[in-house]
Image (cartoon, rainbow, N blue to C red):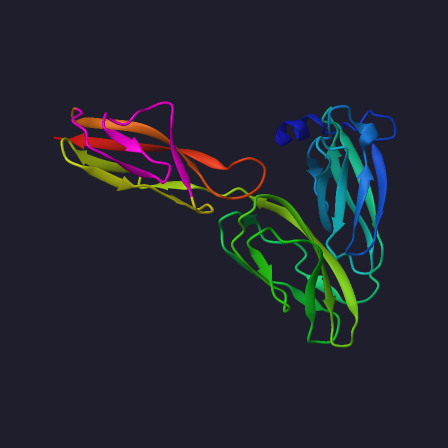
Amino acid sequence: MAAAGLAGAVDQPSTYPGCAARELRVEWGGAAVVDLSGCQSFGLGAVATAPAHGSALPEGDPATGYVYTHGGVSPQGGGSDRFVVLDDNSDRISIRVSIAAPASALALGPETLPPLRAGAAMRLRLEASGGSAPYRIEVIDGGWPAGLVMDADGVVSGTPIARGPFRATLRVTDADGATAERSFSGESAPARIALVPARATATAGQPFRQALHGRGGVPPYRFALEPGGQPPPGITLGEDGVLQGLTAAPRGDYPLRIRVTDASTGAGEHFVTADFTLRVRP
């Protein structure tokens, strides 16, 4: 969708009155909302050109504005940034951001966060600079995705269990009592869930039991059969992933479609549908 919108928006500024270009001012390391409610009828589109010194995330559902969050690292001494979003006609709205100079040289990096994904362990050290060590770092608003913790030294670690957008505003204090604030925002992506094993073998007339497992997501997992295949008579799949029973079915391969749902939090449920083959032998 975003690629199609971008292709249609080349050299085509927004035709909504006063929407081809907008101005926004933001404090160093802060955030501000550009109100684009008059530039859409059905909700704004995606970011066509990302800002160089911060991030831009939609405001509202459907989006009627964008939140620009300055990264708190560059450009040195303040300056400007720019990003482009699409209106609901896939035409471009260019936003120029004026970034105020930092109140002090104290800063907190990195400028951008590594990708976050629910179910994937991560460890990140935030680096303070421009003041007198040692530094103390704390969250003063918002927070990291559930499952991540940050210590006073600025080490963020853990395994995210939440999907979706997040924003954490931090304060760094140096040994002389000087402070600076920095906001980090982003999104925790859905987990890449896999089903293991992908096949098993049952012997006709003999008790059969095979435990299925999910990998890559947030445990515990739930399992269910999807349309498109049924196990042989006498074999059932429990919500806990145990495939078991006793069958007298003819030999052969019985393809199944199995839904695997993890325990991550966020909008709706997160699941994948995976192929599984149960072979029956005499």
Figure check: 165 above or below 101: above
Q: Residue furthest left?
A: 282
- Residue 73 shows up from this direction: no
Q: Nearer the viewer, residue 215 or 25?
A: 215
Q: Position of residue 92 (x, y in %)?
A: 76, 31
163 or 32, nearer to the observer: 163
* Membership of 226 in magenta stretch: yes
Q: Position of residue 132 (x, y in %)?
A: 74, 76
| Res. 21 image quadrant | top right
Q: Residue furthest right?
A: 18
| Quadrant housing residue 78 | bottom right
Which quadrant of the figure contains the N terminus?
Answer: top right
Q: Is residue 231 above or below residue 130?
A: above
Q: Is residue 36 above or below residue 140?
A: above
Specify start and end residues of the magenta stretch as a single range.
221-249
* Relative to 6, 248 lies left or right: left
Q: For the point 59% across and 53% down, which residue is it?
A: 114
Q: Is residue 245 left or right of residue 271?
A: left
Q: Residue at x 32, y 24 (%)?
A: 229
Which corner quadrant holds the C terminus? top left
Q: Nearer the viewer, residue 76 or 159?
A: 159
Total marks in image: 0
Residue 157 is inside the magenta segment = no
Viewer-closest of 243 and 16:
243
Is 264 placed left or right of 173 in the picture?
A: left
- Image quadrant assignment for residue 201: top left
Image coords of residue 127 (percent x, y): 65, 66
Residue at figure coordinates x 13%, y 31% from the top left:
205
Task: Confirm whether residue 206 shows in the render.
Answer: yes
